[in-house]
Every structure is written in structure tokens, then in C-alpha cells.
Image (cartoon, grey):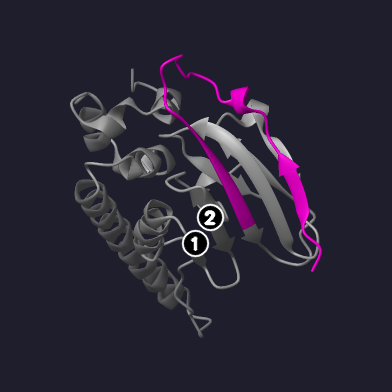
Amino acid sequence: MKRSFIIIAAMMLTMITASAKKVTVTIDGTVYRTQEKIYLIVDEDTANAVVVPVQNGQFTVTTTVDANSIIRLHETKEWPERAEFVIIPDSKHIIADLNSSTIEGSPMSQRLRTALSAIKREDPEGFHIDVFSDDPEAWRQAQEAGESMRRQMRETQRTVAFQQMRGNSKNIIPAWIAYCYYSLLEPEVELMLKDKKQKWTKHPILMKIQGSD
């Protein structure tokens, strides 16, 4: 099966110092066959996103980035929390398959994917209660019940997100969780970001969060 191939220049990443450790990674990806392109975004620098062509649902991209970078591969520049793949470049060759929902060759990327899946499972978005009645009172009660359950689900999601952050406090996974779910996790996450003793709180993507500096 024909696979598109693109090599990205090493200096596309912003906010890296001369002494930062660089790594080169090749990512082989499988997405939906109808997809024609995918964006490669390093540390949420969407202004310098690179368009990677997709052919027959497959793509290959090689890039050189900072060792602590977080790479988002997504059909759109928006909605990072919905990204097809979020990659931590901890190996030279990574295989990501959207159809099987797996990432091979990158333990940290798979660990991040597992953490995000746990958080997304508790998302109340789209939840509703069906009402098979013309009685306005039944609709009112259903609406109140639905709102109550959504609040409970949101609180559960907050709890799970904080659990995933604490369980990964020694790596950079919490940085991505804090970035994607900041509005859900504040004000607690704002206090966490002030603790510069933890490696993840210094990650470049967190500079994009209002008040994190």
C-alpha cells in the first residue's frame, strides 16, 4: 500500500534552547481512508503546523524535536483534546493506528493515550435523558435529573483527571492534561502550575495557559 513520506526540518520547534536535547523520530500512522491530510503540531505551535499528506489512510513523517516535546497529529489545528494521536518522542520509530486505537514503539505515548481515554470516558458531553411523554412536568423533571447527572459526571471526570496527573507526576503527561482540561481543573491546577519543582510544570505548552506564568 502506497504511503506518503515527508521530512520536517529540525528547527520548526519554538522555545527551545541551544542546550536542549534533540531527538529524531519517524512516525508511521494509519487513519481513516477518506482522510487526505493530517497536521503535525509540536508543543501546540499551530502557527508552524506542518501538513502531512495521507494516502490510502496511511502516512509517514520524520521530524527532529526537543526530547520533551509533545507532538499532536490531528486532522484539524483546533480541539487538541480530540486529537487522533498525541506522541511523546521516546523512541526513534513509532507506529500509530487510529483503527485499532494503539500506539506501538512508544511506551510514554501509549501511557498518555491510556490516561486520556480514562478521562474521556467520564465526559458528560452528549449525555441526555430520553423522555417519552408530552407532559411538561415530565420534561422538567428529566431536565433537572439530566443536569444533576452531568454535574456528577463532570466531578468524576475531574477526579479521574487529577488521579492521572498525580500518577504521572514524574513525567510530562500532566502537562498535556492540564493544557487540554484547564477549564475543568482550575483553580486547583493553577496552584499546581506554580510548583516549579515538578518537571511537567515547566513544559512550553503551559505558557499558553492564561495565568500559568
Q: Please give the range of residues in magenta.
A: 1-28
Q: Answer yes or no: is residue 53 visible.
A: no
Identify the residue at image location x=50%, y=84%.
133
Q: Nearer the viewer, residue 212 or 20?
A: 20
Reply above or below: 40 against 65.
below
Label 1 secondary element: strand
Q: Residue 174: x percent and y percent?
A: 31, 42
Q: Position of residue 124 (x, y in %)?
A: 41, 62
The residue that disc 1 covers is 103
**Within the image, what quadrant is residue 122 found in?**
bottom left
For residue 31, which quarter of the picture? bottom right
Q: Position of residue 6 (x, y in %)?
A: 74, 43
User: Which numbered disc, 2 or 1, marks the residue closer to the eye?
Assistant: 2
- State yes or no: residue 169 in magenta: no
Q: Quadrant of the C terminus?
A: top left
Q: Could you tell me how far apart the alpha carbons at marks 2 and 1 are, in whole angstroms?
A: 7 Å
* Amino acid at pointer 1: Ile
Q: Which residue is mark 2?
A: 94
